[in-house]
Amino acid sequence: MAGPHESRADPGPGSRATIERQLVRLAEPTRRRDQVHTIDMNDGYLVDAPDLRDFDVDDEVGAAPIAGDQWPAIWLLAFDLVTAAIALPLALLLLAMISPAESNSLSKFWANAVSDASFPVAIVIALALAGFYRSSRWARYQSSFSELKELAVALCAGCVLSIAFSLTLHLIFDVTESNSTQLLLAAIVAIALITVAHATLSAFRRGVHTRVLIVGSGSLVDRIATYSSLTKGVEVVGRVVDASTAEEGSLGTVNDLPQLCEKFHANRIIVAFPTVLSHNSVTVFRSLPASVHIAIVPRYFELVSWRSRITDVYGLPLVEVAPAHLSGWDHFLKRGFDIIAGSLLLLVLSPVALLLSVLIKLSSPGPVLFPQERVGQGRQLFTIYKFRTMAVDESTQSDESEISAQHASIPLHELRNKGVEAERITRIGGFMRRTGLDEIPQFLNVLRGDMSLVGPRPFTESESETFAGWQARRFELRPGITGLWQVSGRNDLSTDDLRQLDYLYVASWSLWWDVKIVWDTPRAMVRGIGAY
């Protein structure tokens, strides 16, 4: 939309309105080879732009991909073919054990294996059509859990493709038709095996396979660099500015990107939204070789979440912000997930809790549990329970510092004097804090209805007094044992960060997002990021 001083009739090729349209069309969802994705980067969100450029770029500067950028796709295809071939007999054996049907019995195993032999090939074809073997996937910030949804859809499509192939052969050559139940179970087994296989391959890939150049300046660039550094296999090689002259600390300007990509072997560009839009910059982005993949941080990225989607109006891409409302059905689903998953996790962790209780008693005198008043859903007070991690000292009992406006940008570990507490932390207490095991008793809070498995961070009453307006939406849900704050930095975050993350979570909640956060939590605990 034109600004107040711009002509509405003909904005011209260099106007802000025209340039905005050109920049946003880097993520245009029409006429694309690659699907546009909204992807997470430690729960910060990027719009992954499709490749609108010609793939025949052998004559362009820096067109040759990084060594190792192409071979993974070939090996991954072969690996998936073998994994799908293993999934088929496993599914047939499992079905023979649980199905009373004669057609699924063990005596029919080899006959069924032959009739279902097209399954592994169909799975690989479906994965290829879904883009799993494009080199661009290797440059994305995408966890194995984020990939799971796409993988499930692709494998179901592969199952249908295998059934269609078998039906075609049956109609033409009168061969035995595949059993759809067998193929469906094989697809379910393949989802599990391929997910584990991809995660294992990613864990064992050595070295850096994504080298990032950031376009922009200011605190957002620092934030992108921080998130990138937390991602395995990613290296930020530097930044450039979208200006006519380079700034101190930058490698150059946008005009230098082709040469810099070649010099530093960069295969990914992250564009932080510019303060000044440049027609020339859009031209440079479009001229980059196909081996360099582009992602764009959208304006108002604080509103973009897991549930956000990209749609279009006649080619103009729109980032749809998730409706900021939880229905009664949403609350029912969330509570059901808390009860079922919370009960299972508490049962699994009970031996660990018993061992920790004994170690706490042996480490220092005092109670096993540390109770504290926190503010929950609807601003109601409740008592939260943790394993005691410090030696008892009534004169210096830990108390949360009051949060005020001038403290909003200070990391929580500084605001709460975590460094001072270090002298009183017991040896077993330090281990529990680093791993988050001190929060196991909170599963009892979940079952009582005071807390949720996933939710906003539980604050004390004095801290909660400063939350008003949109920030108070955090009280619409029960506080969580884990949440966006847990997997995004914990006590390294400032109060402002927490407020934004809590609002984003409440306003954009989905059950799938809860499952993803639970999935990501063990990794955050093991790495000990933000634990004090």
Image: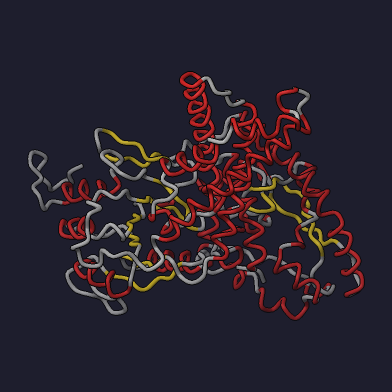
User: Who's the residue at 48% across and 28% down the image?
Assistant: 165
Say left or right for 153 vs 521.
Answer: left
Outermost residue to the front: 173
Say left or right for 518 vs 48.
Answer: right
User: Who's the residue at 56% across and 39% down the image?
Assistant: 510
Q: Quadrant of residue 187?
A: top right
Vertical placement of 196 versus 509: above or below?
A: below
User: Who's the residue at 52% across and 43% down the image?
Assistant: 151
User: Who's the residue at 48% across and 57% down the image?
Assistant: 75
Q: Which of 53 and 231 is in front in this view?
A: 53
Q: Where is residue 38 in the image (x, y as percent from the top left)?
A: 42, 47
Q: Is residue 507 visible?
A: no
Quadrant occupied by the N terminus = top left
Q: Where is residue 449 in the image (x, y as percent from the top left)?
A: 76, 41
Q: Position of residue 342 (x, y in %)?
A: 75, 45
Say left or right for 356 vs 507.
Answer: right
Check the image and tell me how it is coloured.
Answer: secondary structure
Count of numbered tags: 0
Q: Nearer the viewer, residue 157 or 501?
A: 157
Vertical placement of 61 versus 50: above or below?
A: below
Quadrant occupied by the C terminus = bottom right
Say left or right for 225 vs 80.
Answer: left
Q: Quadrant of residue 437?
A: bottom right
Vertical placement of 83 versus 337: above or below?
A: below
Q: Where is residue 314 in the image (x, y as percent from the top left)?
A: 24, 33
Q: Can residue 247 be seen in this view?
A: yes
